[in-house]
Amino acid sequence: MLLTKSSIITKEYITSVDEFYFAAPLSLVLLLGGIAPAQALTIDEQRTRYEKAIAAIDRNDIKTFSRLKSDVKNYPLYPYLDYRDFMRDIDSASTKEVNTFLKTYEDVPFTGTVRARHLSALASKGKWSQLVAFQQTVPRGESYQCHYYYAHSKAGDKALALSGAKSLYMSGSSVDRACDELFDHLKDKGKLTDSLVLERMLLAFDNRNKSLMTYLEKQLTSSYAKRQAKEILALYNKPQGVADFSKKSKVTTFNRHLTRIAFERLARSNPEEAVKQFNRTVEGQHYDKHERQEMADYLAGRLMSTEDATLVAWRDKHLKQSVNQSLLERRVRMSLVEADWTGVGRWINAMSEKERDSLKWKYWRARVLKESGKTAEANAIFESIIGERNFYSVAAADELGKPIDIPYQTTPLNPGALAPFNSALKRVDELLALDKITAAKREWQYILRNADQDQKANLAAYASDQKWYHLCVQATIAGKLWGHLEYRFPVAHRWWFEFFSKERDLPLTTLLALSRQESAFYARAVSPVGARGLMQLMPATAKETSKKLGFRYLGKSTLNDPGINIRLGSGYLRMLLDQFDENRILAFAGYNAGPHRANRWLEKSDGNLDAIAFIEAIPFRETRGYVQNVLMYDIYYSKLLGQKLQFLTESESKRRY
């Protein structure tokens, strides 16, 4: 039984209660006073209470939640409990209360959500003056901008409101319903004119949004505007009428805009017909030389794969006058595929001086010189570009037979530089401990957004020390720390990679390089097309690979597990290397774009190309960059692991592609 004051204090021992409490040790006073000394909770106990508190509020058990919340006030993730508590009554909170909360937790990412909810609450209650006072800058998000500008129309800067309303209205897509009142205000003020509606119809045309065009047509009032709307829809449905429209229509800003987007629609659907109509189209609306070239460029881009001699001649004639660097690059690649070195040189020379002087095109200018027998001139250019962290610099060193030189730097960790982020870093640590990866990433991105350049370098060093592999990479990207190789390329999940490197007879550096390119070591990465995990496997590919490996596949969710993902990803890479005779260039291209495409590109180049020319000729920009990156990352990992630096293997270099 717990002792109490009344059970031990008597006149025989002391003369007064005050005397006893003054003389006794504090721990004995607390014990005898019925107050057991509070024992600090261990971190595991705090985590348990935190997760129970989250579960309690999720089931709306507020009594249990409040009790558990009070137990963990010193826990790093306490702000998230306070946030959940505050958000229960956010709609009834005063602006003063919201601002106080935001000030208290200004370094926590959820402040944006709190601000947005309060803004919506003020809008729903029609408290426009308070909204204007609370939200003093244009918010992010279409619906919030609608509320913001409407609030100004009711209680603030009316000119700002009209300007904002027009800006939101002029969209080729449907706008959030929260803007309905704002657009009504625009209409009431006589600013939602037929002219504005027609301009938006053109934006919808350009955005290929026929349903919006049809909706907008119904908003028109004048017979003249309705006739224009019918012409817009007619050209959308039958763009082959563009030259006739251009010739018969009055030259106006509106008609020139409509003619141009209708011509582009024709170029997409029927480029051969667009060539026939080009001259009449550009003459009808009196386009100047610059505008005509832009329209020709657009059409030329649709003719890059044509084999029709007449269309080829038209395309190349107009490309010679182009300043569109992207199109000229594509034309260089076409010449490369044909092993037309004269053409390669001619199209490089058509580029701007700035573009020609980039490392990439210096390399290819040197290759043109070498192919034409001007070896000394070629080698001088190669020599001028070696020693950089760049694919073409390394390729130049390979041409000269020189060792690869990779510039390298590092930033030792300075804990003092991270003092402003101590609380946030503790939250990241706890979120990772609780496997709340998404929330940890959000905290990390918020830290990086508020860090200066020196702090970003120290954050990368800190993440490296903590073995936060993906966050380390994110810090190098945010800080553009391109020379910090040990931070940009962490040796993550080493045990698994080393195990399957030996199991599949694959270089460790190659596995690390491919995974770094695929996911930056984010184990839960999911691509827009559904590829998952460290090595970004499509579920169908994982299932098929599992079957071939004799491994029981238990569904796409298991691809988040590093061990399973590396097992299957390394197995798939090994199969590709077997298929392509150990050629990494083809295997990497197949890993990214599918082995069928790699085979198609090989068939098209028909043995005319060397390794570097084949990589350059890959028509998919993503795959081309992917292959270059993984080859370079393989070199970086070799440097970090103290291995010999090798660009291409002997068989990769000697093969014709």
Image (cartoon, rainbow, N blue to C red):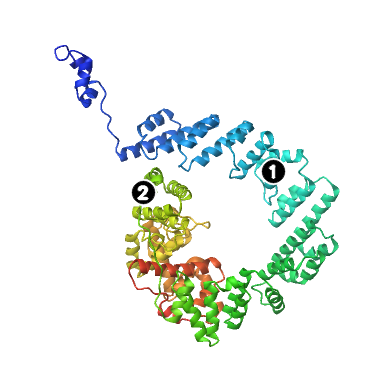
Say which amino acid is labelled 2: Gly
Nearer the N terminus, badge 2 or badge 1? 1
From the viewer's perspective, is residue 508 above or below residue 415? Answer: below
- Splitting the image into 4 quarters, where does residue 137 fall? top right
Residue appearing at x 55%, y 74% in the figure: 361
From the viewer's perspective, is residue 225 above or below residue 329? Answer: above
Report the side of 333 relative to 229 (left or right): left
Residue appearing at x 58%, y 75% in the figure: 333
Q: In the displayed image of the protein, which residue is found farthest to the bottom? A: 373
Q: Position of residue 8 (x, y in %)?
A: 18, 16
Residue behind mark 1: 165
Q: Nearer the viewer, residue 466 or 3?
A: 466
Q: Which mark is residue 416?
A: 2
Residue appearing at x 72%, y 56% in the figure: 205
Q: In the displayed image of the protein, which residue is found farthest to the left? A: 12
Mark 2–mark 1 Cα distance, whole angstroms, equals 47 Å
Of the two numbered discs 2 and 1 in the rendering, the one whose residue sits closer to the viewer: 2
Q: Position of residue 416 (x, y in %)?
A: 36, 49
- Splitting the image into 4 quarters, where does residue 631 fall? bottom left
Say which amino acid is labelled 1: Ala
- Splitting the image into 4 quarters, where does residue 546 fall? bottom left
Provide the secondary structure element on which disc 1 rests.
helix
Q: From the image, which quarter does the N terminus lie in?
A: top left
